Amino acid sequence: MTTTTPARRSTTQPASPIRLSAAGILRSEWIKLRTLRSTVWAYAVILVIQIAFGLLIVAISVNDGGISRGPERGITLASLATFGPIAGVAFGQLVVSVLGVLVISGEYTTGQIRSSFAAVPKRLPVLWAKVAVFGVVTFVVSLVSILLTYLVTAPILSGAGVTSNLFEGNLLLTFVGAAGYLALIGILSMAIGAILRSTAGGIAGALGLLLVVPVVFSLIPADWAHSLSDWLPSAAGSNIYQPGIFEWWQGLLILLGWIVVALATAATLMRRRDA
Amino acid sequence: MIEAHSLTKRYGPKTAVDQVSFTVRPGLVTGFLGPNGAGKSTTMRMIVGLDRPTSGSVTVNGKVYSDHAAPLHEVGVLLDAKAVHQGRSAYSHLLALGATHGIGASRVKEVIEMTGLDSVAKKRVGGFSLGMGQRLGIAAAMLGDPSTLILDEPVNGLDPEGVVWVRELVRFLASEGRTVLLSSHLMSEMAQTADRIIVLGRGRVIADAPVADLISGATVSSVRAVSPQAGELARLLNSPDATITSVDAQTLEIVGLTSAVVGEAAARAGLTLHELTPLKGSLEDAYMNLTADSVEYRTTAASAGAASGGNAGAPLATDPSHSEVSR
C-alpha cells in the first residue's frame, strides 16, 4: 500500500458531510413516489372516483325522492351527508391496492431495488420509509377526496332540505376513518407486493384477498365460514368507517393485525433474499 | 480497498463463487476477468451486500459494506445499467438515490454533466439506449464521491468515444487514490485500462497479478522471421532451447530465442531477412490459456479457438495487432 490518498478524499475522516439517515430515506421515497407518472395518475383516479361516486349516489337519491323510500332500505337522505362522500371507497380501495403493490413491485421488476438497496444496504429502512410515505400520502389524498366530495354534494343535499355540519356528530371522524381504511388497505397491498416481488402476482394476491376470498367464504355453506369472513381485511376494516359486526376500533385492530403479519413476512423475506 | 476472505456463494447445488479470496488495492485499476458464469457479477453483488455470501466475508475499507455510515460515499457501484425504474427521469432517479445520503441537487447536476447526460436528464429512463443507461449507471456510482468504485461491464453498449471516456475516467479515479474494480469482456480494453487483473473461472480465482506478469506468465513469446532462405535459417537456429515452426515456405516462428539471437545468427551466415518481429502474447491469449479448462458455456467454434491457443507448449500463432502490452 504505497499509494497515497489525496488529501481531499475524506474517507478517513469520520465527519463526512454526507451520510445515510432516516430523514434522507424518507425524502428519497417521497421523491420516488412523486416522480412516477403512474403514481400521480392513480391518485388522480382516486380523487375522480370519490367525487364521481359521491355525486352519482347523492344526485340519484335526491331525484328518486329517497326520503319516502329511504327508511325501508336503511338509507335516508339525511344519512347521505355521511354515505355520499364515502360511497367511492369500495372502488377507491381497488386503485389504492393496485398502487400499493406497484410502489414496491415496480422496483423489483425494473431492477431499481438494487439501486435502492445499494444506497440503503440494511434494506428494511427502505420498506419502513415506503410504508410511511405511501401511507401518509394515500391518507391525505383520500381524505382530501372525501372532503371535496362532501363539499360538492352538500349543496345538492341542502337543495333537498338536508343540511349537515362537518364538525357535528361523527361526520368528520367517519371521513377520517374511511381515509385511514384506504391507506391501510394500500399498506397491506404493498406488503403483499413486497412478499411476491412481482406486479402481476402482487395485484392478483391483493385484489384476490379483497374481492375473491370474501366471495369464496360466502359460498361455503357453514357458519364458521361466515364468522371467518367477518375477520377478512376488507370486512373488518370497513367497520372502521361504517357500522358492522365490530366496533370501529376492533375493525381497526383486526386490519392492523393483518398488516403486521404481512409486513413482518415481507421484512423477513426482504432481509434474507438476494436482491 | 476491498478484501474478500473465502467468499462462497451457492445457489442450491450450484456453487457460483467458491472460496474466493482477493484484495483490491487503492490507487490501482483492478480488472475482473472470467468467462460467463465465472462468478464475477455475483462476487461484485456480494461486495455491496445485494447477495448474501453462503460463507466467507468481504469488507470495504475494513468494514462490511452495510455497516458504513455513508455507503454511497464508500462504494459507487454500477451493477447493471437497468437497475433503474424505467418510468422515472434520470435526474429524478439520481435525486432520489442521493436523497438517502443528503446529497442534493447540485451534486446530481454535477454527475449529470460529468457523464454527458445533460440533454436527456429530464427524459424517462425507459427510452434510454444501452449507452445512455451505462452513463446513468456511472453517474449513480459517482454520486456519493466514493473512495471505491465497482463497475460491472461499464463499457458494454458504449460507442468508441464512450469507451475511451470510461478508460480515462477510471484511470483518473485511480490516480486520485481511489480503489477501482471493473469487469469487462473486452480484453484489449482491459489490457489498456487495468493495472492488475484477477481472473475468475468456475467461481475460483485462477490468477491475480499485474497485467504484464499475467501475460508473460501465461503466454509464450516468440519471434517471427521471414527469409527467402527459411530452411537454411531453421537449420542454423536448431538447438535444444529453440522450438521452430515453419508457418510457410519463407516464414518461421521461433520460440525460445530472442530476436537479437536470430538476427545475429542470420547476419553471421549472410542470410537475407525480410522481417524479424518479436511477438508478445496478448492479454486475450493469456486469458484463453488460463480459462481454457473453466469455460462453462462453450460453443463449438470457441472450443476450437481455445484449443489452438490453449496449449502453452504449442507454437503460438500470435497476431501482432494483439500484442499491445502498453503498460
Image (cartoon, coloured by chain):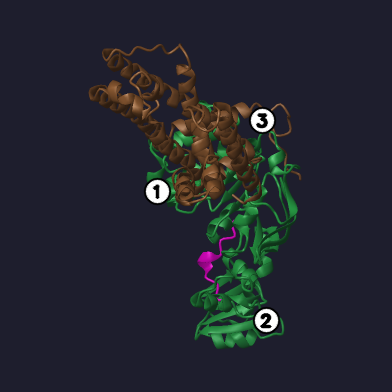
Q: Which residue is mark 2?
A: B242
What crowding class fits label 3: few (fewer than 14 Cα within 10 Å), some (14-19), or many (20 or more)?
few
Colour assignment, chain A: brown
Q: Nearer the viewer, residue B218 or A225?
A: A225
Q: Could you say which disc has been placed on residue A61 in the image?
A: none
Residue B238, picture quadrant: bottom right
- At horizontal 60% and vertical 34% (from top left) the residue drawn is A128
Q: Are marks 1 and 2 on the same chain?
A: yes
Q: From the top left corner, tell me how far across and down residue A43 is, in percent.
A: 40, 31
Q: From where the camera sits, is residue A223 visible?
A: yes
Indicate the secondary structure of the residue bearing disc 1.
Answer: loop
Q: Which residue is mark 3?
A: A8
From what the image shows, is residue A104 above or below residue A9? Answer: below
What crowding class fits label 2: few (fewer than 14 Cα within 10 Å), some (14-19), or many (20 or more)?
some
Magenta stretch, residue numbers: B317-327
Closer to the eye: label 3 or 2 = 3
Indicate the secondary structure of the residue bearing disc 2.
Answer: loop
What's the amino acid at mark 3?
Answer: Arg
The prevailing secondary structure element of the residues shown in magenta is loop
Instruction: Assess whether residue B136 is covered by the magenta stretch.
Output: no
Instruction: State the separation of the CA atoms marked 1 and 2.
Output: 52 Å
Colour assignment, chain B: green
Q: Nearer the viewer, residue A211 or B85?
A: A211
Q: Which residue is mark 1?
A: B129
